[in-house]
Image: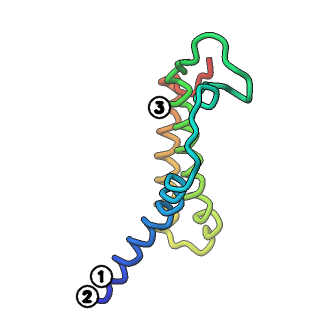
Amino acid sequence: MKEWTFIAIIAVVSLATPAAPILIGKLIGPRKPNTLKNATYECGVETVGDTWVQFKVQYYIFALVFLVFDIEVVFLYPWAVAYNQLPLFGVIEGVIFIIILAAALIYAWRKGALEWT
């Protein structure tokens, strides 16, 4: 039971740590809303016209593809550093991982997810 108590304490502390400053700010922070504070602006300049701008989904897909391949480079780096010490099984797993990455890249390329226009 000691192990679970320690895990419960860590869970409570990890939830309370970010929540405490937010709650304290809400409780003791000044509340003086007015129209100027609630106005929408960008870079200190008031907007002209409609402030709702819809972005193309393609930009989000491009960002997600970049993020996926960026994270997978993080997984490949330790494999490349320890390449000389790996057994044959580790090398084969790394090659399979690279083949899966290449297949995903070819799929995204053919779907047009890498086109910026």
Residue identified by numbered label 3: 107
Q: CA distance from mark 3 to mark 1?
A: 45 Å
Residue 1: which numbered mark, if any?
Answer: 2
Q: Read off the residue under disc 1.
A: 4
Give the mark nearer the N terminus: 3 vs 1. 1
Secondary structure of the residue carrying numbered label 2: loop
Is there CB contact under 8 Å for labels 2 and 3? Answer: no
Residue appearing at x 59%, y 75% in the figure: 85
Mark 3 in CB contact with mark 1 (< 8 angstroms):
no
Q: Residue at x 62, y 60 (%)?
A: 77
The residue drawn where x is 41% and y is 76% is: 10
> At which x and y percent is residue 68?
52, 44
Residue at point 52%, 26% (across, down): 113
State which tag comes first along the sequence, 2 or 3: 2
Nearest the camera: 42 or 11? 42
Amino acid of disc 3: Tyr
SS assignment at label 1 = helix
Compared with 56, 37 (above or below) is below
Q: Type of residue at label 2? A: Met
Q: Quadrant of residue 14?
A: bottom left
Question: Are the residues at dot 1 and dot 2 in contact (C-beta closer than 8 Å)?
Answer: yes
